[in-house]
Image (cartoon, helix red, strand yellow):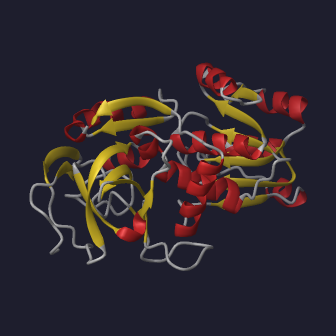
Amino acid sequence: MGLFFWGMKGWILKNGSLVWEDQLPDENQTTEHVVCDVLTSALNHRDVWIKYGKYPDIKENIILGSDGCVIFDGKRYLINPSIQWGNNELAQSDEYSVLGMPTHGTFSDKISISKENLILVPDYLTDEEAAALPLAGLTAYRALISRARTTPSDVVLINGIGGGVAMMAFQFALAQGCKVIVTSGHQWKLDLAIKLGAHAGYLYTDDQWTKRLIADFGGVDVIIDSAGGDGFSNLMKVIKPGGRIAIYGGTHGKITNLNTQVLFWRQVSILGSTMGSDQDFKEMVDFVQKYDIKPVIDEVFPLSQLELGMKKMETGQQFGKIIFQNQDLR
């Protein structure tokens, strides 16, 4: 606690509301922590779920926010939001957590963070683009590359284009040379994705979308999904024999209608994926620099308008990341 400095302010979770006030000491600080100025931060669905009590083990009096571009010692850094992943590349440790609850996050003017979680921002990225990268980029990289092990010859389906992780997986797959297909419940999102390089897009609200995809492409080799739920049965219809489905979320709930006969007969692999290791994070940043990838940004708000950004995400109208600027530091 000795590293805590009075004067830090942030959006603190209190009884389901976010209140801008002084930070409380973070009991998890160590001598390896340094205090950084937060230039920009980015919103994730995780933040909205925590606010509304739809996330496990919620801790009050904590500043939310898992993404940030910060200044330390005159240099810009990305924050790796994976805390204490551990030494096992296959899965996170029992001590693992995500920045922004239970530890103070980036919706603040300053943050105290371990030096091990800082990595220099690629020079070509703006402050806003840098803040958009960490959590979405890490999650997408592990799901697509570390877990599904995509190759340039793969046909990849991104199920539910528009959110931060889906957009990064989309960009990463394109950079690899994959043929990329997307789905959405909104035609305008499909149109934007096609402009950015998608080979095709299908409305998952269309009962015939799986038949159309199979007629057009014969199926897909890899699926990246964050929905689960009843719609998962449609993914099983379009996956090719030997295909891989990487799941990094479950916004539509439990998968209740999985046909196990299709699963084993087609030799399909279902791969769970959560965030990523420190090694994944370093490899992801190297990958982004190699291909000059810039995260897609939907809209930029002042940090004082955090609630407006959250309301936009709740309606599902974003295409790319929602960013917050700390106006006092610009």
Where, quadrant-wise, is the N terminus in this rendering? bottom left
User: Would residue 181 appear left or right of 127 to someone viewing this image?
Assistant: right
User: Would residue 69 appear left or right of 124 to someone viewing this image?
Assistant: left
Residue 269, percent across and down? 77, 60
User: Would residue 63 appear left or right of 77 to someone viewing this image?
Assistant: left
Q: Can residue 80 be seen by looking at this rendering?
A: no
Quadrant location of residue 293? Answer: top right
Tell me the residue at 45%/52% (across/down): 121
Q: Can residue 268 be seen by looking at this rendering?
A: yes
Quadrant location of residue 235? Answer: top right
Tell me the residue at 54%/67% (across/down): 277
Query: In this view of the protein, which residue sits in the foreground, 201 or 31?
Result: 31
Give the number of marks.
Answer: 0
Query: In this view of the protein, which residue sits in the foreground, 39 or 90?
Result: 39
Tell me the residue at 52%/72% (across/down): 92
Tell me the residue at 48%/72% (across/down): 85
Residue 52, percent across and down? 32, 45
Residue 195, percent across and down? 67, 23
Reply above or below: 309 against 232. Answer: above
Residue 161, percent across and down? 61, 35
Query: In this view of the protein, which residue sits in the foreground, 73 or 32?
Result: 73
Quadrant location of residue 230? Answer: top right
Q: Residue furthest left?
A: 6
Where, quadrant-wise, is the C terminus in this rendering? top left
Reply above or below: 295 against 256. Answer: above
